[in-house]
Image (cartoon, rainbow, N blue to C red):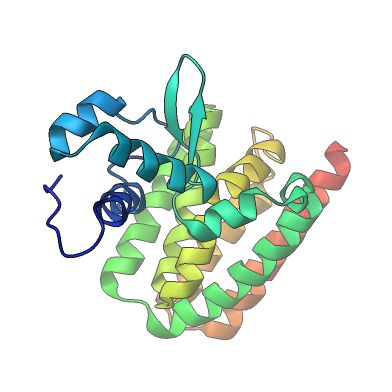
Amino acid sequence: MKTPVRQTPLVVQVTEQFRALIEDGSWPVGVRIPAELQLVQDLGVSRSTVREALRSLASAGLLQPRVGDGTYVIARDDLAALLARGDELQDLQQVLDVRSILDVAAASWAANRRTTADVQSMRRALAARRKAHDRDDRAAYVTADVELHRSVVQASGNALLLRLYDAFIDVVTEAVDSTTTLPEDPRLGELHRELVDAIEAHDGGRAADTAAELVREVQSADRHAS
């Protein structure tokens, strides 16, 4: 971390430094950040300045102080914090509805805008998903599945869409986990392969249709599990 300069209020500078550490993943969601004293020493500012900066980010919903256990990162940015406050995220059907909108749009755009590197990322995630499935490794399977869909969103070339997806990726992960049964329906594996194939072939219509069918399959699995 950089020692703040006195061009703007110190509290503002320190707050923005902490915010940057959260947003770039240096302080990932779920981790405990360094203690106040360590932050004071790192930055060379007063403890009250550090405390006020942490309080500001806690009020914004990015940090959560826990008595006797330090302060934890609970959201990556303001959008994620805003979404995390909504009871709607506890409703799996609503999460799946929003995900369907994002996934279908992203698939169509990705087919038109994807790069070779994007396709390689999708192929890696697809292979990891298949490998985890064959090992019956549920946690790795869920992680790879979410990463595959995120790589499609990233290939869409829409930075705002990716930010929105990342804002509730933890909830998406929970949704995938709650609807996952291993071994999976073979059709699900086929659809994921078809999705990547369509994107690689620049076939936006087929990519969107495949993404929509994937959503229907997941929603059907959720209804059967309920």
Name which quarter of the figure residue 32 lies in.
Answer: top left
Task: Tell me if residue 196 comes above or below residue 72 in the rendering.
Answer: below
The N terminus sits in image quarter: top left
In percent of the image, x 34 and y 52: which residue is there?
A: 19
* 129 and 91: which is toward the camera: 91
On the image, the x and y values in percent for residue 149 come to: 51, 58
On the image, the x and y values in percent for residue 108 come to: 54, 80
- Residue 196 seen in render: no
Task: Tell me if residue 160 comes above or below residue 75 in the rendering.
Answer: below
In percent of the image, x 52 and y 30: which residue is there?
A: 139
Residue 103 left/right relative to 141: right
In percent of the image, x 54 and y 27: which residue is there?
A: 136
- Residue 3 seen in render: yes
Residue 191 left/right relative to 67: right
Label tally: 0
Residue 94 left/right relative to 106: right
Task: Tell me if residue 10 comes above or below residue 44 in the rendering.
Answer: below
On the image, the x and y values in percent for residue 89 come to: 72, 50
In percent of the image, x 69 and y 44: which residue is there?
A: 185
* 144 and 42: which is toward the camera: 42
On the image, the x and y values in percent for residue 74 come to: 50, 40
